[in-house]
Amino acid sequence: MMTDDEAPYHAHIYFTEGQRGIAEDLRTRFQAEASILFVGAMTAVRAGPHPIPQYEVHFLKSSLDVVVETIRESGLRALVHPLTDDDLADHTTLGEWIGGKPLELDLTTLDPPGMNQGIARFGKTDF
């Protein structure tokens, strides 16, 4: 049985072209962190609901505080959310924006409640 600390989480790290170097440095830090399960590729364009370049980081709730603090230190904007069977809620009401104003996500690309493809790819792959 999964404990609360084992609950899956995502962080979407957003960056502009001018922030690419900072985003790459943060990505390298996350890749070296043993508690991070997966660090995705940096996208150059919109992907899924995300309107600007980003990459995702997969981790367990037990690492949430460390991940959030590391993102804050970078100065980049991010959306951090649990991974549940409700993709829409994950990216809206359950998500926390860090380092800036929330971006307007394309919610039409998200899975309907009860079917979250992110669960199947947790710790494994990108968009």
Image (cartoon, rainbow, N blue to C red):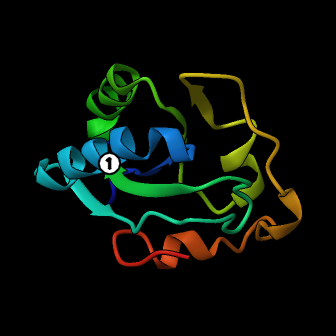
Q: Quadrant of the C terminus?
A: bottom right
Instruction: Please name whichever residue, 91 or 32, is drawn nearer the observer in this view of the structure.
Output: 32
The answer to whether residue 4 of the structure is visible from this angle is no
Q: Residue at 25% of width from left, 61% of height from top?
A: 37
Q: Residue 23: horizontal and vertical position, in percent? A: 38, 44
Query: From the viewer's perspective, is 55 left or right of 1?
Result: right
Assign the N terminus to one quadrant of the image: bottom left
Q: Quadrant of residue 84?
A: bottom right
Residue drawn where x is 74% and y is 47% of the image: 89
Outermost residue, front side = 18
Q: Using residue 11 as the reference point, say whether residue 90 is left or right of it.
A: right
In the depicted structure, whether residue 106 falls above or below residue 78: below
Amino acid type at mark 1? Thr
Residue 109 in picture, x, y percent from top left: 81, 69
Residue highlighted by disc 1? 3
Q: Tell me what residue is drawn at x 43 percent, y 47 percent.
A: 20
- The secondary element bearing badge 1 is classed as loop
